[in-house]
Image: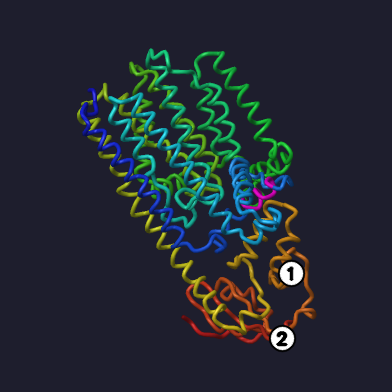
Amino acid sequence: MSHNAPTNKTWEICFALLLAAAYAYILAVFITNQHYRGPYWYFFNADPSYAFLIGSLGLANLDGTHFTYHPGITPQLIGAAVLRIAHSLQFENTNIVVSVISKPEKYIYCISLTLLALYMITHATLAFYTKKHFKCDLLLQLCILATPFVNKYPVTDIGGSEFYGFTCESTTPFLMNLLLLIILATYHRLTTKDSTAKNTAAISGVLATIGTLNKITLAPIMAFTFFIQRNPNAKKKWAIAAAATFCTIGLPLLLNINIFIEFIDTISKGSGLYGSGPQTFVSLDNIIDNATAYATNYYTEAFITAIATLTICISRNTTKRTELTILTYITLAQIITTLLVIKHYQPRYLFPLNHTTPLLLYFSHKILHEKISPKFATSASLILLTLFPTFSIPKTFQHQNRTSTEAQDITDIYNIINSNPDIRSSQHIYPLNNSSQANALAFGNAWARTPFAKTISEAHPETLYYIYGDFYSLVGQKVETANIRGDLYIFGPTLHLKNGDLKKLNIDVIYRNSSQFIAKLSTPLNSPAPEINGTEK
């Protein structure tokens, strides 16, 4: 059955309205996110924004970056370019390091806006390419229009601001748009005799490398662009382009390849921050539980993936060989990626897979169209497409509300501090996981292993940490309690009051809400602590 778009201007108007509605939604979520979640230095925002900011600063200042864990090179290169441009446009006399350390929020916002613009530009390119080269294929055009609505915010994970939060690492969305564009360009070339359809092998090789340098979990889906090349010369062009890109753009990784290898090694050996579990790279021990968790968080995406898998199993004799090949490659890439993250599963790790789900639906429809009732296949596909915004939009705002509650708690703490001269002018002590700009900068510097500790310390000279019973300076030097004098206040997550982290301190809680507290420290600091008291909000 042919699902042709109307030949008059009706579809032109509908297409434009739907595209405008999608971009209005993206902008609305981006703007409201800035309000609901608070500054980037709030603790749950600082990871990963500040780590990528400091890594980008290292590249912008030609100091390099050691933040090459997964490996995260692509966002740091883009961030470095933005930092350079933004700094030059301010016409400041200060060098770029001092400028970024003194105004990190402004620079992170510039990077966020850049990534937002890249996403919208690449999606518009993808949408209009589809409309031009598949102008009679209404379902495919609708699938592309649906991609902004694939599920971004899982209920069980407060993380996930990578997408419409557009933090410093949010390069995945626009890279996935480019991947979809490559897939459709390849599909167009393989299924038509259009002489203007060019082989995209070299471009595919560049994109695959940039995507893998962004996140190693993108490697399976990016490798698809190699295997879909049928001509040996095309595969050769892909390999040459990929190698050249890796040796240039991948230079920061090559200079710190030991860090990346160590990261992979700790995962495979079941050690380190991201390597918990058995000593295997892929663990199937919890596959049922994690598969259930994925389906719980991503209902529509999981259901369409199941349909695609079933379609592959029953379509060995289909006449739609090209469609079956593409569907098989994408589905296989999804399965491999899922196995890579199943050991230390988090719902947000599978965000990139969700981006390809509308194409899984489209190619499944193309194949099943000849096996079942065409009318039923088309109707079912359209219904499934409507489920993307139906589930995703409410979940997005649910995520914002959850983030807003904790952000408001932190805002309340700082309102009290700023309105009280005694607290504001006193020495501040920070426990682990506190929300402060000094902590966010120190956190980013620690992960990026860049030489900016001194500059950060000079910008926040009075900062002290209390970690596991000892006091430390911002640069990690231990401070003797005898050298700490004056009025002292400690504030941070109430978790520290519950688990006894502060039991060595003599403190008086003066304010406490659902997630944060402020307390005054009595001197001498090494005196026995009385029972913690204070007021509840």
Residue 431 vertical position relative to residue 78 in the rendered view, above or below: below
Is residue 480 found left or right of 357 in the rendered image? right
Location of residue 49 in the rendering, given as x and y in whole percent from the top left corner: 57, 54
**Which residue type does callout 2 highlight?**
Thr
Neighbour tally class for label 2: few under 14, some 14-19, many 20 plus, Cα within 10 Å:
some
| Tag 1 secondary structure | strand
Q: Nearer the viewer, residue 131 or 189?
A: 131
Q: Nearer the viewer, residue 314 or 242?
A: 242
> Magenta includes 20?
no
Residue 107 vertical position relative to residue 536 in the rendered view, above or below: above
Q: CA distance from mark 1 to mark 2?
A: 17 Å
- Using the rendered view, name the quadrant where residue 105 is placed: bottom right
Judging by the rendered image, the residue that carries numbered circle 2 is 523
Q: Residue at x 38, y 40 (%)?
A: 147
Q: Which residues are magenta?
A: 52-60
Magenta residues, dominant SS class:
helix
| Tag 2 secondary structure | loop
Q: Which mark is residue 472?
A: 1
Who comes first in sequence, dot 1 or dot 2?
Answer: 1
Q: Residue at x 39, y 14 (%)?
A: 194
Neighbour tally class for label 1: few under 14, some 14-19, many 20 plus, Cα within 10 Å:
some
Location of residue 500 in the rendering, given as x and y in whole percent from the top left corner: 62, 75
**Which corner quadrant holds the N terminus?**
top left
Q: Residue at x 71, y 54 (%)?
A: 95
Location of residue 434 in the rendering, given as x and y in whole percent from the top left corner: 60, 68
**Which residue type does callout 1 highlight?**
Tyr
Location of residue 12 in the rendering, given as x and y in whole percent from the top left corner: 26, 33
